[in-house]
Image (cartoon, rainbow, N blue to C red):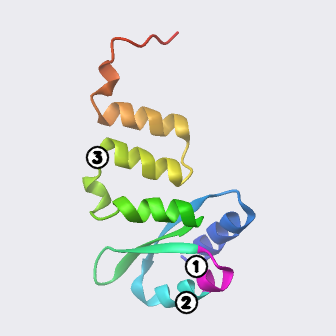
Amino acid sequence: MLRVFNTYLYEVLKGTKPVALVTFERPLLDKVLLKLQKEKVGYFVQNLSMDKVNLFFGKKECINVIEKFLNKPMCEFSPFEDFILGSILGYDIELQCKRLLDRSNINSDKNSHVV
């Protein structure tokens, strides 16, 4: 898991990834938080269980947005919250739009016309 973290951290520092998400075993958390603090990278820790956490890290503005609505398990996100998080994490925007349409009732909009 540290290899994935280091790759994502490199991408965040180089500006190719705005935010990353890595799930860690709790004992590794202190080590990676020290590294993020040293590099002055924003982060947010979401507790998943006694043993695991989700660590979001990257641009401070993005982390602030994530922190505002990450007050529940991600499986309980509305389609729009899911879309926002996926977009912030840099997931393919076309796939995020398709996922949003599939998960919500906005797909039945009669006023739009796609050629």
Which x, y percent locates residue 91?
54, 48
Q: Which residue is mark 3?
A: 78
* Mark 3 surroundings: few (<14), some (14-19) or many (≥20) residues within 10 A: few
What is the CA distance from the residue labelled 3 to the residue labelled 2?
33 Å
For the record, the magenta segment spans 35-41
Which callout, 3 or 2, points at the residue further toward the start of the chain? Answer: 2
Residue placed furthest toward the right: 14
51 left or right of 28 in image: left
* Mark 2 surroundings: few (<14), some (14-19) or many (≥20) residues within 10 A: few
Which x, y percent locates residue 50?
28, 84
**In this rendering, which labeled residue sits more in front, label 2 or label 1?**
2
Is residue 39 part of the magenta span, yes or no? Answer: yes
**In this rendering, which labeled residue sits more in front, label 3 or label 2?**
3
Give the residue displayed 50% in from the left and 65% down from the top. 63
What is the CA distance from the residue labelled 2 to the residue labelled 1?
10 Å
Is residue 14 part of the magenta span, yes or no? Answer: no
The residue type indicated by label 3 comes to: Ser
The residue type indicated by label 2 comes to: Lys
- Whether 20 is drawn above or below 80: the answer is below
Tell me where residue 101 sits by quadrant.
top left
Q: Are marks 2 and 1 in contact (CB under 8 Å)?
A: yes
Q: Which residue is mark 2?
A: 31
